[in-house]
Amino acid sequence: MSIFKPSILSYAVAVLSLPAMANHNNDSMDDIGKIDGKVQSVYFDEENKGADEITKHKGAWTGALWLNAETAHFADVVGFGASFYQVVKIDMKDRYAREGGSDGLLHDHQDENNPYNNYSEGFGNLGQLWVDFKLPETNDGVSANLKAGRQLVETGLITISGSRSVPSAWQGVDAAVDLDGLTGKIAWVDKVSMRTQSGFHDIQNDKGEKIDNVIGMELSYTFDLGNQSSLEIQYRNGLADKYVQSHNGNITYKLPLYDGSELTLAGMYYHAKEDGKRWSWENINDTPFEKKAESSGVSATFDTGPLSLTAAFTYSKAKTVAKAQKNGYHAIGYYDYYFGANTQGAFDMPTASIYSDFNYDKEKAWLIGGEYDFSESGLKGLSLGYNFVYGSGMKAEKVGGKSKDVSEYEHDVTVKYNFANVGLKDLNLKAQYAYNHNDKEFRMATGQANAKYLRAWLSYSFEI
């Protein structure tokens, strides 16, 4: 497996430092809006081994520009905004294109003369273009706004992906209201721009059939219990027309302890059910679940100074159709949180990890992990996190044969560093490494591979 070579880091630092020479603050911009953005270099490298026991690779190294422009609200009511994204290919090994692709960093194409010859390249995208209406700020205790156009919608269970070269986006209407802490949001979207494409496209199912729209809603309220403790209750949903309905409930309790430490207890529940003729797959063996699926979990997080420790447990049920098979095994279903084959969806389970979501049928997943900020130890800006997740309870059953208990586990390491110590507080490095291992019978019945996965982002944020 390739590693994140020092030459990559050196080159990216040089590229991302260029905007610093032009960066300056202009107080008058506060009166008319703002222009800001980010330049980043992203490096992904994945090595995986599937049911066929063949090792494959995918990944790439890219450079990307995010540029955002936003006006102030005229008459304290209406404002406008837009975002442009550009991706360039810095490097991509031949084996990546041959064996698995760019892993979501570049725009994948198909050679019309040879359908088996995929290739990837950079692209540009007008990812946001919106108008925003809001209530004037004279309404004490009440705020509301409505944004229409191409935008980064994160309402209900509708969400975006910002973990690749550039973010995905939606076209539609997004509205929110806050009444003294009671927050409600609703969104309606009918087109999507994925993180690897330019332009906006119809939301589609696996067969390429159009899904007319997706609606997302949420409602949340936080109760102040005194002594700095609180209880938050949240409900979210996502409704894809004639495709799927998904619902989610969360309860979060925060309790201060001693010397500034805090304990956070959380419970969450996800439920999804098929909702029409668009819930259909080109290959029946790829159907994630039949009729309905659910996933529930609990977590406890202890924060004290620079240290944060987390323990969590989740359980999923997602029985798939009886005829679904993979590699001579009855397919193991999973909780599918997407609202179309070319979309995203929110799934905030604590055991959902860098590589695996640990949400297969009858899977019991345990997580233990933590993060430490070394700033108080003399290494300002450096933090290190580690999670271990173990999932079991699934059964891999041969067609016409015996079943076997199977499991999976994953080690995740995350390193973050802010370069404030060298005068570059807006320059950030984040690197993640995941090692996922599972039983061979599990790979046969799910199609999920063993994997070694390295991700790294070096980003510089700026304001003009």
Image (cartoon, grey):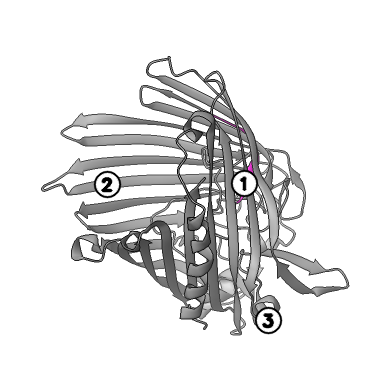
Residue lying at 53% horizontally and 25% vertically, measured from the top left: 145
Q: Is residue 23 above or below residue 42?
A: above
Residue 127 visible in image: yes
The kind of residue tagged 1 is: Ala
Please state the extent of the stretch shown in magenta in the rendering. Answer: 168-175
Left or right, 260 with reference to 78: left
- The vertical placement of 232 against 423, above or below, is above
Q: Position of residue 63 (x, y in %)?
A: 59, 64
Mark 2 and mark 1: span between their CA atoms?
Answer: 32 Å
Question: Foreground: 318 or 126?
Answer: 126
Numbered badge on residue 265: 2
Gap in Å between the C-alphas at discs 3 and 1? 29 Å
Disc 2 crowd, CA 10 A, few/some/many (<14, 14-19, 20+): some
Q: Please check the rendered image and state whether residue 173 is part of the magenta-colored stretch, yes or no.
A: yes
Please state the horizontal and vertical placement of residue 151, each as a whole percent of the image. Answer: 61, 40
Q: Is residue 425 magenta?
A: no
From the viewer's perspective, tell me whether residue 394 is left or right of residue 158: left
SS at mark 1 in the image: strand
Q: Residue at x 53, y 77 (%)?
A: 441
Q: Which residue matches tag 1?
A: 169
Query: According to the image, label 3 marks what residue?
Result: 94
- Outermost residue to the right: 113
Task: Kindly tell me whether residue 166 is visible in this rendering.
Answer: no
Q: Secondary structure at mark 2?
A: strand
